[in-house]
């Protein structure tokens, strides 16, 4: 135990310093924060982006802290919860997202505003006939090794026919919605199940599988799954119903004109530095967590369906914020990038803040030590953690730079634990934020969940790690 006490000291000092900002937020339970709370809203219930947070959370913070609608940004926009919830409240919303999956969901949601409903109905009605009559088709899904044989053969043929048919639909709104419908059922019609770090494969697939056979239950035929999804979409969009569904959160009684959202496709590490200083009133975001979750593997089926090839997917994995053990360092790249935009001294300042964090140094050194002692289940965990914080240090700097004085930044993130030691993501990122000109108003801690018996917490876990929503305000 002496060892634990010794290595905990810098984190404890930081904890003691920020302890008065930590506050359990009983109104922000896990369900309100998580994507689950969106399940009654159209589009969110058509495609579940499990990494998303809820519209209710966005609306709560914008209403509680945003004095009046202004400019809103989400640098990790995902499926666009911040953007669309903000838009409903009259904000001018901008989002950066690197994964084509999130970008496609946002684009589809935009297309909804203009969709020709009678034409959509007509197109859906004739769809099955068209597919039955199609003999030749030019579109083919190009698989990568981790998706090969993911679909039963007959499903694969139908998917290809369906994609070929979609290309012929001239109305872009209707085409997008149709493509989106099949996109939303890819997991259900496949032999796979999303499982965080990778896809789990059902024992019925053609693959040679090791380990205990996995039975995912019913694998839906393409026609059944797509019909169900299209019926859901049509029902939600039917002119009578959509008015109430989209309006279920009144916009404070004001009749806001909705400002179109602005989707920036790319990495926020490159896009934020291009934004003018002091130009946003509110940033509301949730970055990837430092937990080895691999978006490019989890969404591999969706990525190939959208036409991404092996090289693009590997490239994406490396360009995303480091949160998997496969991520390589981006620091040399960032150095060149900052030099190329004439901001070499900013680069040095950011590195200085990172290196000046005693808690960060402590985390890096105990992880290196744990590696030597073989206490981590993957030897690249220290590299991932180091780069996660290093890259987030750049993001936090840029967020502080582009927020106007008095503006807010709200961030949802979970702490993590490696080798039994908690890494206080909330405190370390808040320390960076203070250095770059944010005041740490609050770190709201979500109430502890149920069912965290010591047994479930694993060998080391003695306490549940904090899941938080940080509230920072630009001085
Ligand atoms: C926790 S999710 C955010 C979900 C979002 N709040 C929502 O409700 O849909 C984090 C997102 O960050 C994206 N991301 C990862 N690295 C990025 C980068 N360098 N630039 C922009 N987005 C990135 C991921 O693709 C993912 O969609």
Image (cartoon, rainbow, N blue to C red):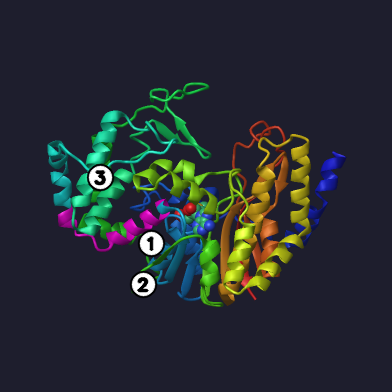
Residue 14 image offset from top left, x and y in percent: 77, 58
Residue 18 image offset from top left, x and y in percent: 73, 61
Q: Which residue is mark 3?
A: 163
Q: Nearer the viewer, residue 269 or 336?
A: 336
Q: Nearer the viewer, mark 1 or mark 2?
A: 2
Residue 253 placement: quadrant: bottom left
Q: Nearer the viewer, mark 3 or mark 1?
A: 3
Q: Residue at x 20, y 41 (%)?
A: 137
Q: Is residue 33 visible?
A: no
Residue 403 placement: quadrant: bottom right
Q: Which residue is mark 1?
A: 249
**Distance of label 3 from label 2 (alpha carbons):** 32 Å
Residue 272 image offset from top left, x and y in percent: 53, 68
Number of disc labels: 3
- Mark 3 lies on a secondary structure that is helix
Principal secondary structure, stretch drawn in magenta: helix
User: Badge 1 local density, few (<14 within 10 Å), some, or many (20+)?
Assistant: some
Side (left or right) of 243 relative to 8:
left
- Mark 2 lies on a secondary structure that is loop
Which quarter of the rendered picture does the C terminus lie within? bottom right
Side (left or right) of 294 relative to 4:
left
Q: Earlier in the sequence, mark 3 or mark 2?
A: 3
Q: Is residue 334 visible?
A: yes
| Circles 1, 2 touching at the beta carbon (< 8 Å) | no
Q: Label for residue 259?
A: 2
Q: Earlier in the sequence, mark 3 or mark 1?
A: 3
Q: Earlier in the sequence, mark 1 or mark 2?
A: 1
Q: Label for residue 198?
A: none
Residue 163 is a magenta residue? no
Residue 200 image offset from top left, x and y in percent: 47, 32
- Mark 1 lies on a secondary structure that is loop
Highlighted magenta segment, given as a residue range: 101-120
């Amino acid at each position: 135990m002496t060892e634990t006490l010794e290595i905990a000291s810098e984190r404890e000092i930081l904890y003691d310093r920020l302890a008065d900002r930590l506050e359990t937020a009983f109104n922000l339970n896990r369900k309100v924060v998580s994507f689950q709370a969106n399940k009654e809203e159209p589009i969110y219930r058509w495609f579940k982006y499990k990494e998303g947070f809820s519209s209710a959370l966005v609306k709560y913070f914008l209403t509680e802290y945003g004095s009046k609608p202004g400019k809103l940004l989400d640098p990790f926009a995902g499926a666009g919860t911040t953007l669309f919830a903000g838009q409903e409240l009259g904000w001018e919303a901008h989002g950066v997202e690197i994964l084509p999956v999130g970008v496609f969901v946002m684009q589809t949601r935009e297309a909804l505003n203009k969709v020709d409903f009678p034409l959509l109905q007509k197109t859906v009605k004739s769809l099955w006939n068209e597919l039955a009559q199609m003999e030749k088709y030019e579109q083919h899904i190009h698989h990568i090794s981790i998706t090969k044989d993911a679909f039963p053969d007959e499903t694969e043929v139908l998917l290809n026919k369906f994609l070929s048919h979609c290309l012929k639909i001239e109305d872009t709104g209707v085409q997008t919605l149709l493509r989106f419908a099949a996109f939303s059922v890819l997991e259900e019609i496949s032999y796979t199940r999303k499982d965080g770090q990778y896809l789990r494969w059902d024992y019925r697939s053609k693959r040679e599988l090791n380990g205990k056979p996995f039975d995912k239950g019913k694998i839906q035929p393409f026609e059944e799954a797509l019909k169900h999804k299209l019926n859901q979409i049509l029902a939600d969009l039917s002119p009578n119903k959509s008015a109430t569904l989209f309006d279920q959160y009144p916009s404070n009684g004001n009749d806001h004109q909705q400002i179109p959202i602005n989707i920036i496709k790319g990495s926020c590490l490159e896009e934020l530095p291009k934004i003018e200083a002091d130009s946003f009133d509110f940033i509301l975001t949730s970055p990837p967590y430092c937990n080895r979750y691999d978006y490019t593997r989890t969404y591999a089926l969706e990525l190939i369906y959208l036409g991404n090839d092996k090289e693009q997917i590997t490239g994406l994995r490396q360009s995303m914020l480091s949160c998997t053990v496969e991520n390589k360092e981006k620091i040399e790249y960032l150095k060149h990038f900052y030099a190329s935009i004439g901001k070499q001294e900013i680069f040095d300042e950011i590195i200085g803040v990172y290196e000046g964090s005693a808690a960060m140094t402590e985390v890096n050194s105990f992880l290196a030590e744990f590696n030597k002692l073989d206490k981590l289940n993957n030897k690249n965990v220290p590299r991932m953690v180091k780069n996660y914080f290093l890259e987030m240090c750049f993001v936090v700097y840029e967020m502080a730079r582009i927020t106007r004085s008095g503006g807010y930044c709200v961030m949802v993130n979970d702490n993590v634990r490696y080798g039994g030691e908690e890494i206080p993501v909330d405190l370390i990122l808040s320390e960076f934020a203070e250095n770059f000109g944010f005041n740490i108003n609050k770190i709201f801690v979500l109430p502890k969940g149920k069912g965290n018996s010591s047994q479930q917490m694993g060998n080391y876990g003695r306490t549940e790690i904090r899941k938080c929503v940080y509230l920072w305000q630009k001085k």
